[in-house]
Image (tube, rainbow, N blue to C red):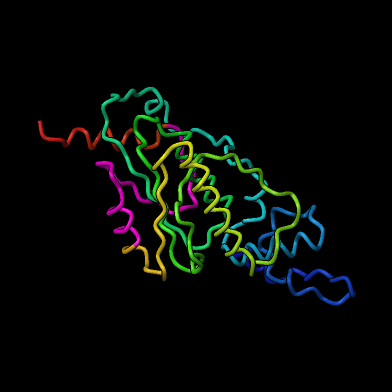
Amino acid sequence: MLFVLLYLLETPGRGKDGQTDTSFSDSSLFAHWGQELGPDNRRVALKMFQYYGYNGYLSDRLSLDRPIPDLRPDGCRNLTYPLNLPQVSIVFIFVNEAFSVILRSIHSAINRTPSYLLKEIILIVEGVIFHRSPPRHPSFTLVICHCHSSPPRDISMQKDELRRKLQNFVSETNSQHPGFIKMVRHAKQEGLIRSRVSGWRVATAPVVALFDAHVEFNVAGLNPFCSELKKTEPA
């Protein structure tokens, strides 16, 4: 409750003309972050926060392969798993996620899942961003994308930018690893359940793992699940 009171009592900043800058009146984003940002970058960060529901401005400036704590208990870290586990198709479902967030999800899945376990990654793109004609031969390879340091453009341009970047990423990735990443586009927003079904239908691995596109995998995150599934196979 104290946090809420502080939030309501915050004083809005001042714009260039000295008038109250209402863009900072909803400034919970800056309670513990961003004090060093100038007014223009604060406006951009707040606009992205309101659009995505998370700090997209900060995400664009974090490494796609950033280290994250290994939170497994010691007993889990010392476990070993057989190599003949069933392969997995990872399905990411999203609508207008920040591109850096999508890429970080993909990178963490690839980097922290054994290659013998991960058969493919499937992206389910829920409507809105692919109203234009897609390229004829979409493909998808692992590309290191350097996030920009200049202020992002207006949110109104985010859909076009996401469309372009995804298409480029798909083409470059599959040129090196044919068929590794598949993309399914829904012409309209179908909802979570139908999107999951779309991913399941496209998947070719015996195990299908469904995720939002704003996650980060930890070390060997899928091994325990596949190991348990292995035990249920008929003798």
* Side (left or right) of 212 relative to 102: left
Q: How many marks?
A: 0
Q: Considering depth in this image, is 1 or 44 the residue closer to the camera?
A: 44
Q: Quadrant of the C terminus?
A: top left
* Side (left or right) of 42 relative to 100: right
Assess whether residue 197 is covered by the magenta stretch: yes
Residue at the spot 74% in from the left edge and 68% down from the top edge: 24
Residue 121 vs 41, above or below: the answer is above
Q: Quadrant of the N terminus?
A: bottom right
| Residue 231 on image: x %, y % | 19, 33
Residue 192 vs 32, above or below: the answer is below
Assess whether residue 152 is covered by the magenta stretch: no
The span picked out in magenta is 195-219
Residue at the spot 52% in from the left edge and 53% down from the top edge: 167
| Residue 51 on image: x %, y % | 59, 66
Residue 98 vs 87, above or below: the answer is below
Q: Quadrant of residue 159?
A: bottom right
Q: Considering depth in this image, is 135 or 96 the residue closer to the camera?
A: 135
Residue at the spot 42% in from the left edge and 45% down from the top edge: 181
| Residue 48 on image: x %, y % | 64, 62
- Asked whether residue 6 appears in the rendered view, the answer is no
| Direction front: furthest residue | 136
- Asked whether residue 230 appears in the rendered view, the answer is yes
| Residue 162 on image: x %, y % | 57, 58
Residue at the spot 37% in from the left edge and 68% down from the top edge: 190
